[in-house]
Amino acid sequence: RADKDSLWEAIWIAENDVLKEEIEKRGGELVTYDAQLNLETQISQIEDAVASGVDAVIVSPYDWKGIRPALESCNAKNIPVVVIDTKVFDSDLVETQVVSDNELGGKLCAEAIAEHLGGEGNVAIVDFSTNMAVQDRTKGFEEALAEYPDIKIVARQDAEGSVESALPVMENMLQANENIDAVFGTNDPAAIGAIAAIESAGKLDDIAVVGIDGAQDACELIKEGKLLGTAAQYPSLLATEVVNQIYKILDGEEPDDDIIYIEEQWVDAENVEEYQETNAY
């Protein structure tokens, strides 16, 4: 899977590189398909993989519910499926799911905003409501923010997780709400697009922005003082764990759990350089 923004694409590239390396270490071969944000294409590609006789399928679903026909195709041929990065709705059709702890990521963002605002203020969310990972992020964010009754969510709009879409969305929210104190970008591209709009409006000193991903571009914005912080994911750890589970299953063992969560880490001005040296993608 790839996305229209280079920041999101970097995640998939990082994951794919590690998947390939780890599988080849064990004498296997990885065949990668790119659905280009098209559900029908993704289903067709998985069906093609099944027809070619693969031993297992790793999928990062574009649509967590719509992917069901592809999962059924795998099940019909007794081909195990392991999910990476974004959960599927029909969990009974997959062996296990290895995902970032996105609720934790949302919580980390909320706590950073609450500390920055001193427990009171107005927050806007640049959302991507059709994405399951983002749904988990906003759930964690809202639950953590509920501990601060003087912080209110005053605006929320979808931006499809891209810089390009987030910029006009943020412009619209600024025009409709004069008193926004902080912005939760539900991924780094959304946060970066929001920053561009806020900076253009001359309000960068007045509005704090947080994101989720841990991409290099976000880290540079932290160092420039434009992004308060990001809840960092670890694509390499996700990919390594997926391969571990795949080979357990192929050896006839049970996976470690139905869902395996990889923790996220808060990255801000205090630790960004250390994080960049070892983990940023």
Image (cartoon, rainbow, N blue to C red):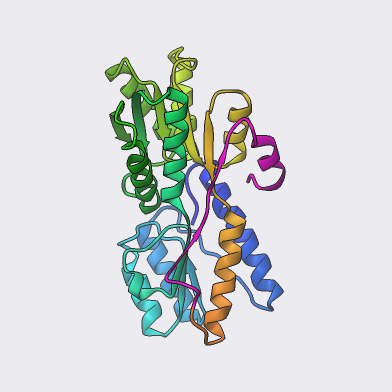
Q: Residue 121: image x %, image y %?
A: 35, 22
Quarter occupied by residue 50: bottom left
Query: Relative to the observer, which residue lies in front, 148 or 62?
Result: 148
Q: Which residues are magenta?
A: 255-281
Q: Is residue 163 visible?
A: no
Left or right, 143 with reference to 13 = left
Indicate whether 9 appears above or below 203: below
Indicate whether 33 appears above or below 103: below
Query: Relative to the observer, which residue lies in front, 213 or 41?
Result: 213
Query: Relative to the observer, which residue lies in front, 163 or 281?
Result: 281
x 37%, y 41%: residue: 144
Q: Is residue 278 visible?
A: yes
Quarter occupied by residue 35: bottom left
Query: Relative to the observer, which residue lies in front, 147 or 74?
Result: 147
Residue 129 painted magenta? no
Left or right, 253 with reference to 76 = right
Residue 272 painted magenta? yes
x 38%, y 47%: residue: 134
Q: Residue 106: image x %, image y %?
A: 42, 43
Quarter occupied by residue 270: top right
Q: Residue 117: image x %, image y %?
A: 43, 23
Q: Residue 85: image x %, image y %?
A: 48, 58
Indicate whether 76 appears above or below 42: below
x 43%, y 14%: residue: 201
